[in-house]
Amino acid sequence: MTDFAKTRAAFRLPDGVIYLDGNSLGPLPVAAEARVARTISEEWGKELIRGWNTAGWMSWPRSIGDRIARLIGARAGSVVMGDTLSIKVFQALAAAAALVPERRVILSDSGNFPSDLYMAEGLVKALGRGYELKVVEPEAVEAAIDDEVAVLMLTQVDYRTGRLHDMASLTKKAHAAGVVTVWDLAHSAGALPVELERCDADFAVGCTYKYINGGPGAPAFIYVAPRLAAVAEPILSGWLGHEAPFAFDLNYRAGPGIERMRVGTPPIIALAALDAALDVWDGVEMSDVRRRSMELSELFIRQVEARCPSVTLASPRDAAKRGSQVSFRHPDGYAVMQALIDKGVIGDFRAPDCLRFGFTPLYIGEAEVLGAVAILEKILTDGSWDQPHYRKKAAVT
């Protein structure tokens, strides 16, 4: 049984703040400060260039990838860290498309994160040869899978509403039609049990700065099913994906297995913070996290609907059909969220009208949920959100 009191103590949370935005950026793990300081002062500071060998920096993308693998139902040696999520989407999508060269359709849905769709659009333009991106409504995905589709690219949990795709059933349907799958786990890794191997997923990608708490700009990961690791072709043939990077050959030869999905020099300081963040997960069972997050989100929905009639639930009502976030609609959602943040309840806003709240049991409990609802009820009832400075849009919403 996971000890959530212990995990809560592992984070630095400001006094007077109820943090319901771990689905966008996780809070600072206490251990990360000392870990990063050691990497800077002891490893970089004293070892200099020798740190790549003496501190083992070169192996971190794989060893930390193995730690991520445990959280997403993958085996050791099938996950590697590096670069941003958009880059990893591009890599996975290109490799997937190359496995079915006779087909030209990439299928996704309108609930996908826009950056994933942008990367797909860019790949389609770069490949030419009649490739197209087909985007359907989330509910129409299953029916749209046919023998013309090359790749099914989906984000498992909708970033706006938290709606949850059924990975197992959609992957099974895709494979029956000869379609390769790419799953974006940005809003599911660290939030709910993900079973990549059990679902027979082909490729998966994800970020680590949300529920995994790796810090702003923390590196992304890519998963390649072991059965595909030796045949997946890396479209970004970076030097660290080479079979022998320090041979400095003029011609590229893909490295073995997941190593070929490495691109450039790994971000060592960021990886040090992420490694410390992953220490929090030692002894944590994803089934416990899922059960508790469902309890907290259900409590939040009940309380908000009973006390805040001016907002409307945007997320699926069935907890089993959503991730670890809840969204409510309000015509002036941005201003309402800014007022909430001003009063110490940090969530975020997603256009056009969604107030978005993340429920992360590692550091959030019932007291925070009830406290957040009380403040939301107050600002909606007294209209204190309706002020010009709350309507002024910031760069990040």
Image: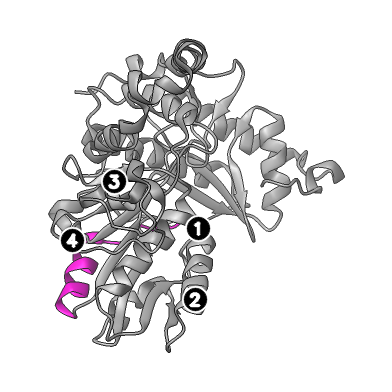
Q: Nearer the viewer, mark 1 or mark 2?
A: 2
Residue 396 in the image, given as x and y percentages of width and height: 68, 46
Pick the front one: 110 or 44: 44
Residue 324 in the image, given as x and y percentages of width and height: 39, 44
Residue 360 in the image, given as x and y percentages of width and height: 41, 33
Give the labeled residue for mark 2. Answer: 126
Q: CA distance from mark 1 to mark 2?
A: 36 Å
Pick the front one: 196 or 53: 53
Looking at the image, how many numbered discs can be counted on the residues?
4
Residue 228, numbered label: 4
* Amino acid under disc 4: Leu
Above or below: residue 390 compared with residue 36: below
Q: Is residue 171 left or right of residue 118?
A: left
Which residues are the magenta region?
Answer: 158-177
* Amino acid under disc 2: Ala
Sequence-first disc among 1 and 2: 2
| SS under mark 4 | helix
Give the labeled residue for mark 3. Answer: 244
Q: Nearer the viewer, mark 4 or mark 3?
A: 3
Q: Residue at x 28, y 37 (%)?
A: 62
Q: CA distance from mark 2 to mark 4?
A: 23 Å
Residue 145 is drawn in which quadrant? bottom left
Q: Is residue 115 magenta?
A: no
Q: CA distance from mark 1 to mark 4?
A: 38 Å
**Number of residues whose C-alpha sits closer than 10 Å to that of mark 4, classed few (under 14), some (14–19) or many (20 or more):** some
Residue 286, numbered label: none
